[in-house]
Image (cartoon, grey):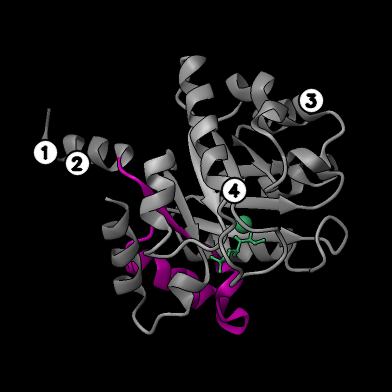
């Protein structure tokens, strides 16, 4: 095995750091996205909100396309929207790599996940803080990533909700029980204090907005999260 291949495997097995652009300067989105790549991010997280599923409105496929042009990093597109089936194709086309739909927004979750699969994208499912692991038990074999909301979706800079920790542990146990390799992403209130706790519970992808963009030195902030996670 070459050193580069070994390094690639090591990278794959480590915890990923995914800055959330929600806390970026929206007047300089391309520049902020490029800065994340330069600062050592593993993926870039994009929050799509519709003012219905969550009480906030953010961005659509046109802006995702612009972000896509600014980086080679994988884009995780988090759809906090009702009836996501009407828009997944547009976001796939715009350059998303992983598409997350919320359990609570999908009447036919299994069908919606198959739709993402048919578009050739990584399949992601997201859970609000109150939604039990049981809600996704029977679709776990159909997804690459489960996003556990560790705050209520809608805004950056909120306080981490403690009751999500046992839920992450339960999710990890269920993934192991089914013999699967599914990523556990956590989103909301992730900083160097909460990072080691969510990783100990089973998280493998840390999504962080204010902890990265609120820092003067982005590379240092990502390094601090990675250090805390190890
Ligand atoms: C919240 C979004 C998050 C948000 C996290 O609805 O899904 O991705 O950007 O922000 P922080 O890390 O500041 O809690
Ligand atoms: Zn998000």
Q: CA distance from mark 3 to mark 2?
A: 37 Å
Q: On the rendered structure, is 219 left or right of 30? A: left
How far across and how far down the image is residue 89, in percent?
A: 75, 42
Q: Identify whether 3 is placed above or below 194.
A: above
Q: Circles 3 and 1: CB distance less than 8 Å?
A: no
How far across and how far down the image is residue 30, in percent?
A: 53, 73
Q: Which residue is mark 4?
A: 163
Q: Which residues are magenta?
A: 14-42
Crowd band around label 2 with a 10 angstrom C-alpha radius: few (<14), some (14–19), many (20+): few
Tell me which corner region of the image, top left, top right, bottom left or bottom right, holds residue 41: bottom left
Whether the magenta-drawn stretch holds residue 41 is answered as: yes
Q: CA distance from mark 2 to mark 1?
A: 6 Å
Helix, strand or loop at disc 3?
Answer: helix
Looking at the image, is mark 4 or mark 1 nearer the viewer? 4
Residue at x 80% of width, y 47% of height: 87
Q: CA distance from mark 4 to mark 1?
A: 41 Å
> Residue 7: which numbered mark, if any?
2
Q: Residue furthest top?
A: 178
Residue at x 64% of width, y 31% of height: 133
Tell me which corner region of the image, top left, top right, bottom left or bottom right, holds residue 212: bottom left
Q: Which residue is at the front of the view, 139 or 130?
A: 130
> Residue 3: which numbered mark, if any?
1
Crowd band around label 4 with a 10 angstrom C-alpha radius: few (<14), some (14–19), many (20+): few
Crowd band around label 1 with a 10 angstrom C-alpha radius: few (<14), some (14–19), many (20+): few
How far across and how far down the image is residue 59, in percent?
A: 73, 66
| Camera sees residue 148 | yes
Image quarter for ligand 1: bottom right
Helix, strand or loop at disc 2?
Answer: helix
Looking at the image, is mark 2 or mark 4 nearer the viewer? 4
How far across and how far down the image is residue 168, in percent?
A: 52, 39
């Amino acid at each position: 095995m070459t050193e580069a291949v070994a390094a690639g495997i090591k990278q794959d097995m480590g915890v990923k750091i995914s800055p959330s652009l929600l806390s970026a300067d929206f007047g300089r989105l391309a520049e902020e996205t490029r800065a994340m790549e330069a600062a050592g991010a593993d993926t870039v997280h994009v929050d799509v909100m519709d003012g219905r599923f969550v009480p906030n409105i953010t961005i659509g496929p046109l802006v995702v396309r612009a972000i896509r042009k600014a980086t080679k990093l994988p884009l995780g597109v988090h759809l906090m929207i009702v009836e996501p089936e009407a828009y997944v194709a547009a976001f796939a086309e715009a350059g998303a790599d992983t598409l997350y739909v919320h359990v609570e927004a999908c009447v036919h979750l299994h069908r919606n996940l198959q739709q993402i699969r048919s578009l050739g994208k990584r399949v992601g499912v997201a859970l609000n803080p109150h939604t039990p692991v049981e809600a996704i038990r029977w679709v776990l074999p159909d997804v690459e990533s489960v996003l556990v909301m560790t705050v209520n979706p809608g805004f950056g800079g909120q306080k981490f909700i403690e009751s999500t920790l046992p839920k992450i542990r339960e999710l990890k146990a269920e993934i192991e029980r089914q013999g699967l390799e599914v990523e556990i992403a956590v989103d909301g209130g992730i900083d160097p204090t909460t990072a080691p706790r969510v990783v100990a519970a089973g998280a493998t992808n840390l999504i962080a907005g204010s902890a990265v963009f609120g820092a003067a030195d982005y590379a240092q902030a990502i390094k601090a999260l990675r250090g805390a996670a190890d």
